[in-house]
Amino acid sequence: MQEELVSRSDGALAHVEGLRHGVLRFQRCTSCARAQTLARYACSGCGKSTLVWEDSNAQGNVVATTTVTRAPSEAFAALAPYVLVIVELDEGARVMGHGAKGLRIGDRVAATYFAHGERTLLRFVALEG
Ligand SMILES: [Zn+2]
């Protein structure tokens, strides 16, 4: 049995690369099937390092929202004020991204992608109906 499915350098790279190609990825534990929040090295459920990346359908529900009026860095100052949301994906993982203004907790959203400098960032927008 292969224990080290994810090397440390793999980390968030798969996530960042996914965004660049318009794919939202998350990690799932192959031991207990728990979906993970953020890029982890070990499962938040069972502690094993049997994490693999899966593609999300990029839809979910808003579970938290905040408006950032003072950007944490110069690179983000041009965007401020902006909305950050935490979205629980349909697969169970939670991700943070930018959100359209007016999003509220419980809203159904879909991920879109936008370029900011050299990075590709997430922006969640409300789904119709
Ligand atoms: Zn697990």
Image: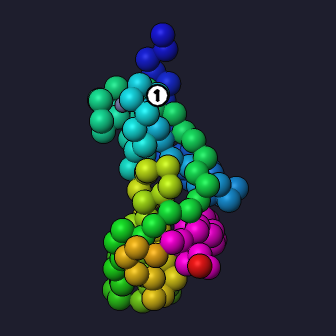
Indicate whether 21 appears above or below 118.
above
Q: Which quadrant of the render holds ligand 1?
A: top left
The answer to whether residue 57 is seen in the rendering is yes
Q: Please give the name of the residue rendered at 41% of the width and 56% of the height, measured from the top-left corner.
A: 94
Question: Residue 119's image quarter?
Answer: bottom right
Q: Residue placed farthest to the front in the image?
A: 129
Q: Main secondary structure of the magenta part?
A: strand
The part of the chain drawn in magenta is 108-128
Q: Is residue 120 magenta?
A: yes
Residue receiving disc 1: 30
User: Looking at mark 1, is its residue's CB closer than 8 Å to ligand 1?
Assistant: yes
In depth, the one of 40 and 28 nearer the eye is 28
Residue at the image point whose x is 70% and y is 56% from the top? 21
Amino acid type indicated by mark 1: Thr
Depth order, front residue of 15/91: 91
The one nearer the camera, 118 or 90, is 90
Picture coordinates of residue 58 (x, y %)?
A: 58, 59
Is residue 24 shown above or below 98? above
